[in-house]
Image: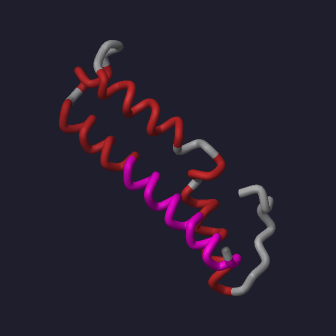
Amino acid sequence: MTELARARVHGDIGLAVQSVVDAIGILVAAHGTGGFADGHPLQRIWRDANFALTHAMAQPAVNHEIYGKALLGVRPNITAML
């Protein structure tokens, strides 16, 4: 993959993960506090999605920075491991 294509994938991942977390947040808000009960599956889904958002590959702000810098031709100062 070219650097620009790889950077775009990062940007797309950030957007996708943020969209999923936002959508689950809407479901939780519509469901009410019962969705946070220990045995309720929505609580686990909400927790897992929000926890996944903390992963380095899923950070929307970082991924958008990588893609934006690539579009502008600026060398990123973020680890190449991402």
* Residue 17 as seen in the image, left or right of residue 76: left
User: Residue 56 location in percent, x, y?
Assistant: 65, 48
User: In the rendered image, which quarter is residue 68 located in?
Assistant: bottom right
Q: Quadrant of the N terminus?
A: bottom right
User: In the rendered image, which quarter is residue 81 located in?
Assistant: bottom right
Q: Quadrant of the C terminus?
A: bottom right
* Residue 66 as seen in the image, left or right of residue 47: right
* Residue 27 as seen in the image, left or right of residue 72: left
User: Residue 12 location in percent, x, y?
Assistant: 50, 65
State whether residue 67 is above or below residue 18: below
Q: In the image, is residue 36 part of the stretch drawn in magenta? A: no
User: Residue 78 location in percent, x, y?
Assistant: 77, 62
Q: Which region of the structure is painted magenta?
A: 2-20
| Camera-nearest residue between 32 and 73 | 73
Q: Residue at (24%, 40%) from the top-left corner? A: 27
Q: Residue at (47%, 38%) from the top-left corner? A: 50
User: Residue 73 location in percent, x, y?
Assistant: 72, 86
What count of labels does the image hold?
0
| Magenta portion: prevailing SS class | helix
| Camera-nearest residue between 13 and 46 | 13
